[in-house]
Image (spheres, grey):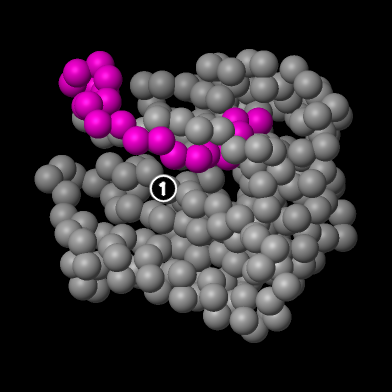
Amino acid sequence: MSEDVDYKLVPTPETMVLSNGKRRAALGDFAKAAIDALQAGRFGQGSVERRSRNANAYTRLDVSYESAFSKPAALRGHLLVEFNHSPLRLEPDKRLVGLLLDKLALGAYTDPFEVECIALQEALTEKLVSFPRRLSMLLARHSDPARALGCEADGDSSLVRHLYDARRLLQVHPELAEDGAGLAKLVDAAVRQDMAAFANQHPEFVADPGLELLLAMKFAKASPDLAAQFDAFVSDQTQFTLAGCSWRAPAHRIGRW
């Protein structure tokens, strides 16, 4: 089963001076090149579905492939590649990656390579903001959020992954939440960025982001549908209530929601 692969397209001085139209075209060309590379590889023609928004600042590629196993509804049965054109808030980390199969079977990667990744504290920040913000948008758009939660087209069937990710980040790196003031600055910057990015799609969030995030978390805490979705995703791992507590702990520390 596949998880998503998120790429940051970090603005450069050259791209920052482009007109909106030229920047949109350049980002569109990048997405097309990625699709061509995937289809020219082993995925094949017609395997990639593209969705872009915000003048191509965000692009989602759903890449289908044949699976040797059944595909439970709680897990994504295809590869999701996402491109976000946005600046980094912290210096990136360099980490070694490789095949998961090697790590599981042999205990180490056999042919690792180095990749620049966003800093873990920045990753945690994005989880802290993205989960309630996306849930808030779903609540604003749908009179029946319980139905929308389970529908990829109407809602966001993978929201609970953010809870799991935040839980794991804090389990392995509890120091990420120790600097409350620093985390608060990162959260504020992420909120301001989302206010600009989703001004047309989510005006309620722009009007009062703090209230929208708070209402979303209150809904999440009491939602049996979210709890069931989370338990289906990681039934033998982190419990939903524990994941929620992990999310709230750093939020309370920085004085948010």
Looking at the image, which residue sits at the far front? 14
Confirm whether residue 152 shows in the render: yes
211, above or below 108, in the image: below
Mark 1 Cα shell of 10 Å, populated few (<14), some (14-19), many (≥20): some
The image quarter in which residue 37 lies: bottom left
Going 65% across and 31% down the picture, which residue do you hit?
121
Name the residue beneath numbered marker 1: 4
Instruction: Give the percent coordinates (x, y) of residue 165.
Output: 52, 32
**Residue 105 is covered by the magenta coloring:** yes
The location of residue 141, given as percent across then percent down, is 65, 64
Instruction: Please state which amino acid type lies under the numbered disc 1.
Output: Asp
Q: Which residues are magenta?
A: 102-121
Determine if residue 142 is in view.
no
Q: Position of residue 82 (x, y in %)?
A: 47, 57
Q: Nearer the viewer, residue 240 or 45?
A: 45
The image quadrant where one finds the N terminus is top left
**Residue located 82% across and 60% down the image:** 206
Relative side of 203 to 19, left or right = right
Element under disc 1: strand
Q: Exactly how many numbered labels are in the figure?
A: 1
Could you say where residue 174 lies in the image, as x and y percent from the top left?
63, 16
The structure residue drawn at horizontal position 16% and vertical position 55%, both measured from the top left corner, is 66
